[in-house]
Image (tube, helix red, strand yellow):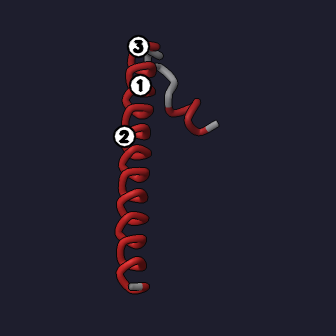
Amino acid sequence: MTGHILAQGWADSATERSSSTTRVVIVMAVALVLLVVISVLVVLVANNALGSLME
């Protein structure tokens, strides 16, 4: 309700909203890829370290 009251008189532009949404989706995709890459590196390093300990 507050957002509706504060937004009165502002033009609602669909192009701004869609480009903003696209930007958010791209940032979230990049963050997800970075998390996966970091996770794979951690698993590989941990596997290597445990392999060295077992020898």
Q: Which residue is mark 3?
A: 15
Q: Nearer the viewer, mark 1 or mark 3?
A: 1
Q: What residue is drawn where x is 40% and y is 44%?
A: 33
Answer whether labels 1 and 3 touch (C-beta < 8 Å): no
User: What is the distance, in whole Å, between disc 2 and disc 1 at their CAs?
Assistant: 12 Å
In what quadrant of the picture does the C terminus appear? bottom left
Relative horizontal placement of residue 5, taking residue 51 as reference (left or right):
right
Amino acid type assigned to the residue bearing label 1 in the image? Thr
Labels 1 and 3: the sequence-earlier one: 3
Labelled disc at residue 22: 1
Q: Position of residue 52 (x, y in %)?
A: 35, 81
Amino acid type assigned to the residue bearing label 3 in the image? Thr
Labelled disc at residue 30: 2
Q: Is residue 13 above or below residue 24?
A: above
Amino acid type assigned to the residue bearing label 2 in the image? Val
Q: What residue is drawn where x is 37% and y is 29%?
A: 23
Q: Position of residue 29 (x, y in %)?
A: 42, 37
Q: What residue is drawn where x is 43% and y is 65%?
A: 43
Residue neighbourhood size for the residue with mark 1, other residues' Cα within 10 Å, grouped as few (<14), some (14–19), many (≥20): few
